[in-house]
Amino acid sequence: MTSREEGAARLQEQAERWSLSTGSANEVVLAACEALATGLDGPALRALAACEKAEADRELPNLLPAALEEQGLTYYTFGSDEASEAGVRLLASRMLDGRLTPRELAAQVQRRFGYDLELAVGLSSLDDEYDLLRVTGRTVDEIDAEVIAEARRVLWVEGNLDDRVRERIS
């Protein structure tokens, strides 16, 4: 990835985390500053990066959609199902690039999304499998392999694979 691509990916990730209430408005503003430093530019991105820390929580919903659109990125409405689905995909990509173990992925998805979000059901169910190892006689390696396969499936939903993870899972 080029530094511009990294700046865009970081901005997208921080925006997704904010829309899920797992990141702060200030982290999004910092990511906007980093994006500018990598060579991304535009009036909406500059306005987002210039947002003062004390006003970030209030101003972000007004500034973020235009800044993301300007960069060809996706805006997810705060707390929406689309944001939750993006969160599941973000966690899956983190596991596939080594930032989470399969067990951590399954546990985080179940804790954050449970069984209410269709995209999360498979991973949430696999979290239960870890707890039932003694009863089922399965091994951690077997469940880990299923979690990895489910993470890949999650990233392929509707035939769309995020370009940020395409190389990581090939």
Image (cartoon, grey):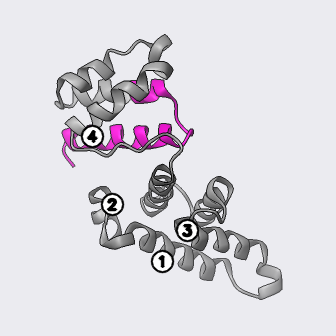
Whichever of labels 3 and 1 marks the residue nearer the N terminus, that label is 3
Q: What range is drawn magenta here?
A: 1-29
Q: Please provide percent x and percent y for residue 83.
A: 47, 49
**Residue designated by label 3:** 118
The one of 58 and 39 positioned closer to us in this rendering: 58
Do callouts 2 and 3 mark residues in contact (Cβ within 8 Å)? no
**Residue designated by label 2:** 165
Which element type, helix, strand or loop, lies under badge 4?
A: helix
Q: Please provide percent x and percent y for residue 37.
A: 23, 25
Please determine whether, in this image, residue 22 is positioned above or below residue 30.
below
Mark toward the viewer: 2 or 3: 3
Residue 25 is a magenta residue: yes
Q: Residues within 10 Å of mark 4 (few under 14, many from 20)?
A: many
**Residue designated by label 4:** 8
Please determine whether, in this image, residue 138 is positioned above or below residue 122.
below
Residue at 50% x, 48% y is: 80
Which element type, helix, strand or loop, lies under badge 1?
A: helix
- Name the main secondary structure of what is drawn in magenta: helix
Badge number at residue 2: none
Which element type, helix, strand or loop, lies under badge 2?
A: helix
Kind of residue at badge 3: Glu
Give how far apart the Cα atoms at labels 4 and 2 are.
Answer: 14 Å
Mark toward the viewer: 3 or 1: 3
Whichever of labels 2 and 3 marks the residue nearer the N terminus, that label is 3
Q: Is residue 84 left or right of residue 50?
A: right
Give how far apart the Cα atoms at labels 2 and 3 are.
Answer: 21 Å
Kind of residue at badge 1: Ala
Whichever of labels 2 and 1 marks the residue nearer the N terminus, that label is 1
Residue 135 is a magenta residue: no
The quarter holding residue 56 reads: top left
Whichever of labels 4 and 3 marks the residue nearer the N terminus, that label is 4
